[in-house]
Image (spheres, coloured by chain):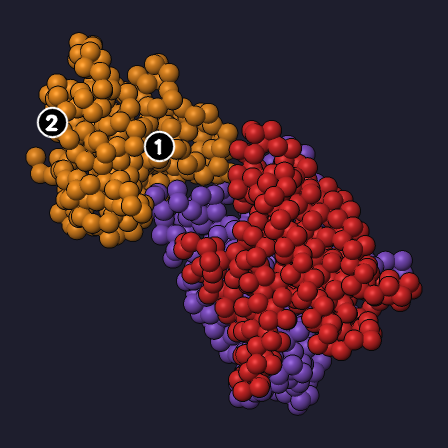
Amino acid sequence: MKKNLFSLLLALGIIFYFILTPMILNSPILRESSFTTLMYIALAISLNILMGFTGYVSFGHVVFFGIGGYITFALLYYYKISLFLALILAGIFAALIAALLGSVVLNLRGAYFAIATIGINEAIKSLVNNLEFLGGAEGLFFNMKIYKSYGGPQNALWLSFYLLGIITIVVLIISYLIKHSKFGLGLFAIREDEDAASTLGVNTKLFKTIAFMISAFFPAVVGGIFFFKNGSIDPGSAFSLTKSVEMIFMVMLGGIGTILGPVLGAITYDKIKETLLVSEAFKNLHLTISGIILLLIVLFVPEGIIGFLRRKIKVLKNILD
Amino acid sequence: MNVYIDTFINGILIGLIYGLAAMGLALIWGVLKVINLSHGAFITLGMFLSYLIFKYFHIPPYISVFFTLIIGFILGFLAYFISLHKIVSHAKNFKEYELSSLLSTFSLSLIITGFLLFIFATTPMAINLPLSLFETKLLASFFSIIFTIALTLFLYKTYMGKAIRAVSQNIDAAKLMGVNTTLILAISFAIGISLAMAAGNLIAMVFPFSTLSGILYELKSFVICVLGGLGNPVGTIVGGIILGLLENFFGLFVNQGLVPFIEFTILILLLIFKPNGLFGGSK
Amino acid sequence: MPSILKVENLSKKFGGLLALNNVSFEVKEKEILGIIGPNGAGKSTLFKCITSIYKPSSGKVYFKEFDVTNYPTYKKVKMGMAITHQIVKPLKELSVLENVMVGACYGKANLSIKEAREKALEVLDFVGLYDKKDLEAGKLNVPQKKRLEMARALASDPELIFLDEVLAGLNPAEVSKMLDVILKIREKGITILMIEHLMHAIMKVSDRIIVLDHGQKIAEGPPQKVAKNEKVIEAYLGDPKLALKLLKEK
């Protein structure tokens, strides 16, 4: 399995490119666009651990992004604890929620699981909408003073960016380690045939739950960083169903179950979106065009960029993953 | 006491409207085993069609609904061949079929919603008929009952309807019996979309709406399908009525804003304990 | 010989149907115990109840003296049971090698991924699938898939292996190859519990045979004796002449 090290290194290289260019050029504009790209990459890789490795397609995965965002935000807002601690707490809390929810919804298969995850996201969104201390439908706003302890707003923005970069690298490496571990082999067995996996000795319930927890932890941390940087949070942007489907889209686009796939998928998706949004002709129709592209991919390249390359170019078959 | 009677009547009426909105989703889910994520977008499309017909031709929604049914059928038929046919015939296994169909119907929804946003933005719209809110609700509920009866008769009394039910129960067996399954799937999808648009067309005369309204009805439709099961239109209507009553009675005791939270909690509990619907067999 | 598996009064109801009715038996260490019976006699149900794929309605299962009745399937596998499926269940998009590695990683063997690879290659060689190791498991033909089932089970280092109609659908040459493999498994000291339709084959390899009919055990004993049993001839073979013919072949 060492041969797949190439894909990991390539993915790392890509991520470093997005971290280093804004840093070297000291460009806030590049930093902002890189921030979005890195966020997409981290989210796609996280989801892939559940969707690609384990075979459970969560349509409401953004719920963990939102939960992480709210926990981080509330901890900073009310208790003024340090950002790092808040992020870790947010990740752990989201993972615990995933364990709790997972123990019931992971018994559902296929489309029923998908619908249940949409339901969870909507339920939590509606709950948050009605919690006074989380600001209800309007959400919460930071007082600019909060950034003071991080060296002012400018520094805080850079800090968020670097934190996101680190998290993206960590989630990539974890995804690689899982894929090539005994645990990962168990997950893939579950993806292929859950009943067969259990008759081969895999503790399917435990494994699915752990995969769900890992794939919930990272979006929560990313959500925390995003809303810290954003300075405000509201239920609509924290629990947006569109973002959920975007995550699935990126994984599909790049290549489900692979290491490099979610990275390529996220970058490509980001580029498509950016191009559509700035182009005069397509700006107002970008949703329609995204829809058409998504449809074309689902119909004609369901195996994603990686799968397509592996199929077309023999040399890449054993290298790309 | 009066409050409870009002709540009850209102719950039934709203429930009938919700049931109407969910009918198309239930049909497609039951026959094609596809959870149609473009359902809400087609409901919205129906709303705007209703609005435009009223605005330019002064034809009220309760008349234009028949026209919308036809347009919906044609669009649905096309949509099947554009977004689903290839997946139906090429998917390697059910898991892949499920995922691909979720994504392809979601992309349909993006296409439609994007188009509507392009033209109408998110401006709230309303159709002002010389009728009271209660009267429009009554009218829409009336249509809901008519549609339920018509769809039930169609599914149980006509050859085509029986073929649709056969395909929904066992597509391979139906194929062996000489049923043209592709045609049946396409027609079922077309009817489902046609019903979604008709529902939108009628709802537009009851409540104000915008390009983003459809998704609300789509989410409610999930709950209704899980409540009422996928077997028959009567189940869907009953599911709708249960949801309507729940919403209205919960609204009396808790903050109205928490109603969706309760709804979706019910959805998740039902999925876990009663995946075949409240009236279906247990897991 | 001590017994490795003991089944006590096992019953299974599906709705109103009694698929398994008070079945009791023991499996001795290192023996091959065959289970036969007409279609619908409850043979596969028996396997599934022993391995917790189905939850038995009543009765007990002891494995190596432990009461394992309510253990989940994976736990039983970890203790040393290995399961094959009548309807093959390859992990389709994983390679043949990876399929076998799952067995080695998660069965009683409980190997690390590196050791599992070694073990898997060894077992693939043993069942004759070595040259297919990098193929996607879904692309194997049926006899190969059956051998893959065996390989996965063997890779787990089992003490007791459940073979559910591994000979069904094979041609005579493949059957005799598979029988060789089965005998070789026994030589390794692994106890075998097998369901089979091919009378001739199972008579040849089994030390003892249990006959099920309508969910009940109607006979138990060495192959020769069982085949002569009136009840068996009547219930299972239906045709006494056929039974005699089978005996002669033996």
Instruction: Give coordinates of residue A134: x percent, y percent.
Output: 58, 84
Q: Which chain appears orange?
A: C
Q: Which residue is mark 1?
A: C86
Q: Earlier in the sequence, mark 2 or mark 1?
A: 1
Name the amino acid, label 1: Gln
Q: Residue at x 47, y 60 (%)?
A: B278
Specify few, some or many for label 2: CA neighbours under 10 Å numbering under 14, 14-19, or 20 or more.
Answer: some
> Which quadrant: the C terminus of chain A?
top right
Amino acid type, residue under disc 2 in the picture: Gly
| Residue under label 2 | C221
Pinpoint residue B16: horizontal percent, then vertical percent: 63, 66
Q: Residues within 10 Å of mark 1 (few under 14, many from 20)?
A: some
- Chain coloured purple: A
Specify whether C99 is left or right of A287. left
Picture residue at 61% right of the left edge, 68% below the top:
B15
Residue A190 relative to residue B143: left or right: left
Residue at 28 percent across and 20 percent down: it is: C198
Q: Is residue A268 visible?
A: no
Camera-nearest residue between C105 and B134 = B134
How far apart marks 2 and 1 lie (CA) works out to: 24 Å
In the image, is residue B17 above or below residue C18?
below
Q: Which mark is residue B213?
A: none
